[in-house]
Amino acid sequence: MHFLETVRRRWQDADTLVCVGLDPEPTRFPACLAGDPDAVFAFCRAIVDATADLVCAFKPQIAHFAAHGAEDALERLIAHVHATHPGVPVILDAKRGDIGSTAQHYAAEAFERYRADAVTVNPYLGRDSVQPFLDRADKGVILLCRTSNPGSRDLQELDVGSRKLYQHVAELVAREWNGNGNCALVVGATWPEELADVRSRIGDVPLLVPGVGAQGGDVEAVVKNGRTADGTGLMISSSRAILYASNGEGFADAARRAAMSLRDGINRHRNP
Ligand SMILES: O=C(O)c1cc(=O)[nH]c(=O)n1[C@@H]1O[C@H](COP(=O)(O)O)[C@@H](O)[C@H]1O
């Protein structure tokens, strides 16, 4: 099934806009995993199994695996999600961007090697750098628009004619790059006004919104400013606040409680 169809099904059937980010940091793992040579996989699998019914997607962040030489754990983790929680899509957060010939390999990495359902892509190299991803009509292409970090102001807010660069990216993606209907955009929860602005420019194109939890974004503002008319349209992503809710033996249960609390907080504001 097409990535965005799968997400829409999760929004409706599982009644959740939560995306759990999988950002393993071994120094923050619970003591019960100390000495486990496969700790990255064991930790992430426990989180996945404890939260799968509460999410519209999982989002493993590739550097958090590659930095520890754990690409194999990432492959097995995504295979585990597909096998054990069918219908829950996986977004590979890789923020790729390169000339077209190299981008083809990044697309193959995301979709063939890792078997991700969607990937985050940096659009700032232009259309040809994104084309190998756009061509995969069954896969999601989630383009950085207004990122959550403070430094996103440096370039993304620059005036380019009658609007700012991130506003141009939002319109370009929604109007010209989304011919296959497989695009989404990233806007940080730390920019609630910009979220409303982007939503007004892109119709029902879905938004991936990281920045609630550890980065302090306000859930109510995100939902009210970013939702579509039917109270969906958002994948609201949190990593550290869920993954490291506890560093005791009950870490997976604590992660479940944190994900449930985020889901319920979102759902309180979903419908007008
Ligand atoms: O593309 C992303 O996922 C992303 C975009 C962005 O603008 N800001 C952002 O924080 N992210 C990612 O989302 C995750 C946020 O993690 P937490 O702050 O722990 O919830 C990290 O993996 C970031 O790399």
Image (cartoon, helix red, strand yellow):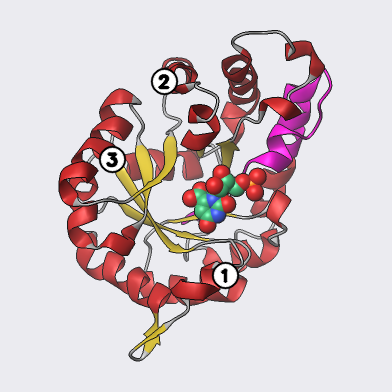
Residue 168 in the image: above or below residue 94: below
Q: Amino acid at mark 3?
A: Lys
Depth check, mark 3 against mark 1: the one in front is: 3
Mark 3 secondary-structure assignment: loop
Q: Can you identify the residue that label 2 sits on?
A: 75
**Cα distance, mark 3 to mark 1?**
26 Å
Q: Of the residues shown, which amino acid type is indicated by label 1?
A: Asn
Q: Which residue is mark 1?
A: 225
Whole-number angstrom distance, CA of label 3 to CA of label 2: 17 Å
Label 2 residue near ligand 1, CB within 8 Å: no
Say if disc 3 is inside 8 Å of ligand 1.
Answer: no
Which residue is rendered at x = 20% and y = 61% of the image? 127
Residue 87 lies in quadrant:
top left
Q: Quadrant of the N terminus?
A: top left
Marks 3, 2: nearer the viewer: 2
The answer to whether mark 3 and mark 2 are in CB contact below 8 A is no
Q: Residue furthest top?
A: 36
Residue 272, x across and y down, in percent: 61, 67
